[in-house]
Image (spheres, rainbow, N blue to C red):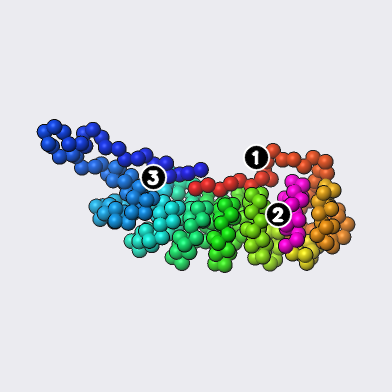
């Protein structure tokens, strides 16, 4: 999904030189704005500065709310991003979907831009309209370097979308095992592991469950909270738990810090493509 489908600049017939040698008309302000944004997307610093000196507002955006900083960040134009920030571009300005330049660069995997934005004070845990964070977007797209950097600089992987999904949930759903491992290494208190494990159980996703359990053989779910709940696990998940050497007592007595009573169907485990248990993909 893209928000940068702004119309391309086209000369009006009246702008061209006519047979009498008359000068073309000065471009309309809307045309200048569009050309300014195109220059930003292309990383043409000279053109961008030319338009700014000509009076174009640095916060000018297209119909979807993408401004010059957003476009430069998306394309990885490091020098232009720095120039725009030096000239007063708002680091946390948001598109109509609530995405900041940090969201956009994280989704695009532009690690160097991400570092610049964070160092310049970008809100590392900003949430878009649907609750997506930069970390969620990077995890979704399997951008290991970005995920690692965001975690090291305060990215909160416990922050969930409006549907209740975390970066770990989307990484599991997309099959990004390396990202999953990085997230689990930073989940020292098990805050995101257990909810993800319950989701895997409800989907009968033995691969994800094994990955969650094998990343910490000492993670005893009962040690997280003493409120036991009855969970009827499908046979495949029971086998998975046993294979991972998890000592949790009877398979029907599990502990969850964030889920109340949970009853699973042991025979029907398939979910439709848009089921609430499937995380929503983030887009710019």
User: Few, some or many C-alpha atoms within 10 Å of disc 2 (few <14, some 14-19, many ≥20)?
Assistant: many
Q: Does residue 161 show up magenta in the picture?
A: no
Question: Which residue: 49% across, 48% down?
Answer: 284
> Could you tell which of marks 1 and 3 lies nearer the N-terminus?
3
Q: Which stretch did the figure color magenta?
A: 198-215
Report the residue marked by disc 3: 62
Report the residue marked by disc 2: 196
**Viewer-nearest residue: 277 or 37:** 37
**Residue 262 point in image, percent of width and height:** 78, 49
Figure check: 13 above or below 123: above
Secondary structure under the numbered disc 1 in the rendered image? loop
Secondary structure under the numbered disc 3 in the rendered image? loop
Report the residue marked by disc 1: 274
**For residue 146, side relative to residue 113 (left or right):** right
Whole-Å distance between the Cαs marked 3 and 2?
38 Å
Q: Does residue 200 show up magenta in the picture?
A: yes
């Amino acid at each position: 999904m893209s928000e940068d489908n702004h119309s391309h600049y086209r000369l009006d017939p009246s702008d061209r030189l006519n047979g009498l040698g008359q000068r073309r008309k000065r471009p309309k302000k809307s045309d200048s704005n569009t050309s300014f944004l195109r220059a930003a997307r292309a990383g043409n610093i000279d053109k961008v500065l030319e338009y700014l000196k000509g009076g174009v507002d640095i916060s000018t955006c297209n119909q979807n709310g993408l401004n010059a900083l957003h476009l430069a960040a998306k394309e990885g134009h490091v020098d232009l991003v720095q120039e725009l920030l030096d000239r007063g571009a708002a680091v946390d300005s948001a598109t109509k979907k609530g995405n900041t330049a940090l969201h956009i660069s994280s989704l695009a995997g532009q690690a160097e831009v991400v570092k610049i934005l964070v160092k310049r004070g970008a809100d590392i845990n900003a949430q878009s309209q649907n609750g997506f964070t930069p970390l969620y977007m990077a995890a979704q797209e399997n951008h290991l370097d970005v995920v690692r950097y965001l975690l090291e600089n305060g990215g909160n992987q416990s922050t969930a979308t409006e549907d209740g999904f975390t970066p770990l949930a989307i990484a599991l759903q997309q099959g990004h095992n390396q990202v999953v491992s990085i997230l689990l290494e930073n989940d020292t208190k098990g805050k995101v592991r257990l909810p993800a494990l319950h989701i895997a159980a409800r989907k009968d996703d033995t691969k994800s469950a094994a990955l969650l359990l094998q990343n910490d053989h000492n993670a005893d779910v009962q040690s997280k909270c003493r409120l036991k709940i009855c969970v009827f696990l499908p046979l495949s998940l029971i086998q998975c738990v046993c294979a991972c050497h998890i000592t949790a007592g009877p398979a029907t007595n599990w502990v969850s810090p964030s889920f109340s009573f949970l009853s699973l169907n042991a025979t029907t485990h398939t979910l439709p493509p848009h089921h609430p248990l499937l995380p929503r993909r983030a887009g710019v």
